[in-house]
Image (tube, grey):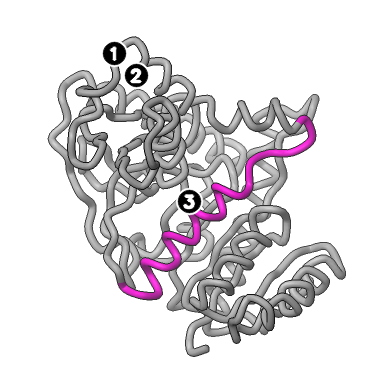
Amino acid sequence: MDKKVTVVGAGNVGATVALRVAEKGLADVVLVDVLEGVPQGKALDLMQAAPIEGHDCKIIGTTNEYAPTEGSDVVVITAGIARKPGMSRDDLLATNMKIVGDVAKEAARYSPDAIIIVVSNPLDAMCHVALEKGSFPKHRVMGMAGVLDSARFRTFIAMELNISADCVQAMVLGGHGDTMVPLPRFSTVSGIPVTEFIPKERLDALIQRTRNGGAEIVSLLKTGSAFYAPASATVEMVESILKDRKKILPCAAYLEGQYGIKDLFIGVPIKVGKGGVEEIIELKLTQEELEALHRSAQAVRSLVEDMRKLERG
């Protein structure tokens, strides 16, 4: 293949991203992880599936060695830890800041022209770390959140109406968390506003379920979190970049005044192509929608401010 994607973090999300990138025939994949043998073993397993799945993408695994990633077109960062019992938000921030920062530096060293997709949590804040530690241009750093959140909203609408999810389009803006902003006004079923099908009280319930989408899965799994849908969402972004499809997708992008928000990564619709964030789409929001987006942005900004305090010691 003439394209290369590096996936840092060989856990469930990272390994599934590698699987789908290869099986779609998008690029060769380098899987990187800190655990010796894990990326190598998963890469070998994926390679042995290639004759059956009918692709010729090469997949290799490496432990904390970034030389094989040199010249990557896209670097996907899934590395980081989940919050554990007894761990404060600051503990999580401090640990994942260090992990994502180190990855960003290595990505910049070996693939200075790459586009960075951040999946690690807290996602919007980690985009700032990748941007600053890797010194990448703003348009080449983006976060995967809105594609996943919108997919969840689309799924719940389709389930509610007992229709194909393929008919449903939905838009979710804001930070990746409780303050995300699903927009029913921009959500449709085969071009028909979803409000024509679902009454407000049911739509409000679907919006709340979307906000709790990740937590619902965690509560069911008990010992893990979602990874199939996050991986699919990430690969949709990767594909739009590598094939220059210029899809309009809701992603965390660095705003410089759009929507009245400045110097912050937040989820908004963007045009995703070979240049990364090629355009930020500024929707005409109602006052209520804009206020909700600003509340979400403030929650993200608080996390970023907490990171700054941790950096200062």
Query: Is residue 94 positioned above or below 234 on the image?
Result: above
Q: What residue do we see at 46% from left, 58% from top?
A: 131
Q: Position of residue 257 (x, y in %)?
A: 21, 43
Most common SS among magenta residues:
helix
Q: Are marks 1 and 2 in contact (CB under 8 Å)?
A: yes
Secondary element at image label 2: helix
- Quickly name the residue at label 3: 127
Query: Is residue 195 positioned above or below 16 on the image?
Result: above
Q: Are marks 3 and 2 in contact (CB under 8 Å)?
A: no
Q: CA distance from mark 1 to mark 3?
A: 34 Å
Q: Position of residue 83 (x, y in %)?
A: 71, 34
Report the side of 41 relative to 82 (left or right).
Answer: right
Q: Nearer the viewer, residue 62 or 210?
A: 210
The label shown at residue 203 is 2
Residue interval drawn in magenta = 222-244
The crowd level at tag 2 (other Cα within 10 Å; few <14, some 14-19, many 20+) is: some
Q: Nearer the viewer, mark 1 or mark 3?
A: 1
- Earlier in the chain: of badge 3 and badge 2, it is 3
